[in-house]
Image (cartoon, helix red, strand yellow):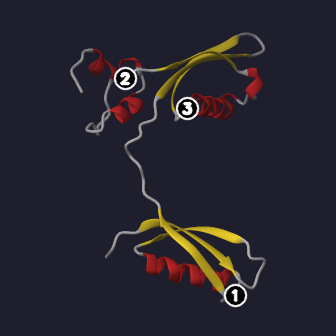
Amino acid sequence: AQKNKLYTAFFRILDNDNKIRKLMIMAPSYDKVRLRVAKLVKHVFKRTNFEIFSIVELKENTKIQAPVYGIWAYFPSKYHKHSFFYEIKASSITRAIEKLYNCIKTKHGTSNYHVHIINIKKLKRIEIRKTYNIQNFQTRVIFPIFNNILNYNLIKN
């Protein structure tokens, strides 16, 4: 049995408005992708005349590691202000802020304009407090790490 890969197929239905469509398909080979596109066009669009422009295999790039950002922020409530620190793994600062807003919305139910960001810092490996962020830096560690072990420098890279 061959392993399924992720492919993107670009095709156009000739009878219709000639709009180029994009379809992502898991399949073991290019031939299977063509067959699955044909089956989809026949089943969904009720057409048999179509043209496939290209089939591209999507490959995952695992070399890129997203940095961890530390964000200090607060939001005022009726009687006092809630201040907090979040460690967020994101590709950029704007993505980290978006993740922070979504997290605060789900936990506290506040809107974005209530949240005041005090400071944003790109954290080094030593400064990270959350264990799952530390595991992302160490690829060989599978079990959960406790913070006190890291503080005593028992695990070294």
What residue is pinned by disc 3?
92
Vertical comparison of 13 with 104: above or below: below
In 3D space, how far apart are the residues under numbered discs 1 and 2 (Cα atoms)?
56 Å
Q: Quadrant of the N terminus?
A: bottom left
Vertical comparison of 57 with 34: above or below: above
Name the residue furthest top.
80
Q: Quadrant of residue 130?
A: top left
In 3D space, how far apart are the residues under numbered discs 3 and 2 (Cα atoms)?
17 Å
Q: Quadrant of residue 150?
A: top left
Residue 125 badge: 2
The percent coordinates of residue 96 (x first, y second) are 58, 30
Closer to the camera: disc 3 or disc 2? 3
Instruction: Please give the name of the residue rendered at 72% of the width and 31% of the height, measured from the top-left corner.
Output: 109
Disc with the residue nearer the chain's start (3 vs 2): 3
* Left-right relation of 46 to 3: right
Q: Nearer the viewer, residue 152 or 91?
A: 91
In 3D space, how far apart are the residues under numbered discs 3 and 1 (Cα atoms)?
44 Å
Question: Quick check: marks 1 and 2 in contact, CB under 8 Å?
Answer: no
Q: Residues within 10 Å of mark 3 (few under 14, many from 20)?
A: few
Instruction: Please give the name of the residue rendered at 75% of the width and 21% of the height, measured from the top-left corner.
Output: 114
- Tell me the element at label 3: loop
- Tell me the element at label 2: helix
The percent coordinates of residue 76 (x first, y second) are 73, 15
Q: Nearer the viewer, residue 7 or 84?
A: 7
The percent coordinates of residue 60 (x first, y second) are 42, 53
The percent coordinates of residue 73 (x first, y second) are 63, 17
Q: Amino acid at mark 1?
A: Arg
Residue 47 badge: 1
